[in-house]
Image (cartoon, rainbow, N blue to C red):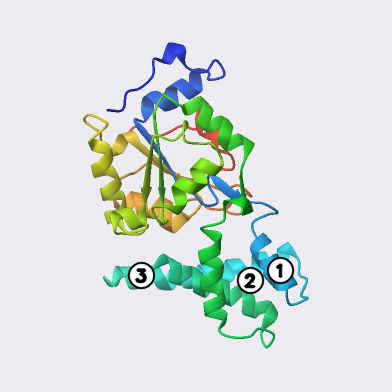
Amino acid sequence: MYARRDLNRASASADAHSAKLFSRFDVIMLDAMNTIFIAKGGKYHMYHEFLRTLDIETSDASLARAFTRERTHFESLAETERRKGHKVEVAEVWARINAGVILEFAKGKINGSAEEIGRQMHHDYLRSPSWFEVHKDMRQFLEIAHGRTLIAVASNHQKGSLPRFISYFKLRELVDMVFTSEKLGFEKPDPRFFNGVTRELSAVVPNLETRRMLMVGNNIINDVSGARQAGITHAVLLDWNNEFRGEKEVQRVSSPLELLRLEFPSR
């Protein structure tokens, strides 16, 4: 049974604002990739590395434009299919996003299917902790939160690979529970993913209510919209690079430490 640690024994670095956050929420759920674990060398490092094998150099700005276009297009198509009741595999969405980015710069220069290359990139991405790091702000947030609220990782991931990331970065003591799409049988943003998380959390957090749960992730559709569709109204976009500063429909932070001072409606 999970039990909250006595607030008086919690880290001295936590002030009244953080105490308010942890008394407000019984559970804080965090996405994994690009939320807890961020790519070394920047968000587009994987693309740079692949393109260099073809002797192609490009800028982060050019990759960002291609990535944003492809991601918006394919995630929009995926959402349309979900609304029709069709199952959409997140890995396949990412295979197409990656393929679109690759073809923007390497059309006619690759051997084989761009989509298959994109699929392999996604596969490697989810299984290679050495490509990633944990930002110091995230580690500090987890240390402050430890024992003051339940911290759960909720990710579209395979059962074995996500615990490997957590162990690799020595986060086992800071994370209370781990939920993967493979284990639950559904992928974010499917509300059934979040319903499954809530159901399992209810077994360890007495009288858990969705209004006392907070979801934090880097993806507006998968993390924010998905949580809201499941009745988890408090969902925050972690926008490390301020790419969505113009987004008006979501609460947004550029560091998890900003959560400690964020105001939440009482609904």
Which residue is tagged 3?
88
Question: Which quadrant holds the C terminus?
Answer: top left
Q: Mark 2 points at which residue?
A: 66
Picture quarter with the N terminus: top left
Nearer the observer, disc 2 or disc 3?
3
Q: Position of residue 68 (x, y in %)?
A: 59, 66
Q: Do the residues labelled 1 and 2 touch (CB within 8 Å)?
A: yes
- Locate residue 178: give its quadrant: top left
Above or below, 94 against 214 in this view is below
- Determine whether the residue tagged by mark 3 lies in a helix, strand or loop: loop
Q: Residue 62 carries which label?
A: 1
Which of the two labelled residues, at mark 1 and mark 3, occupies the earlier sequence position?
1
Q: Is mark 2 on a helix, strand or loop?
A: helix
Marked residue nearer the N-terminal end (2 or 3): 2
**What residue is at 68 percent from the left and 54 percent from the top?**
42
Mark 1 residue type: Ser
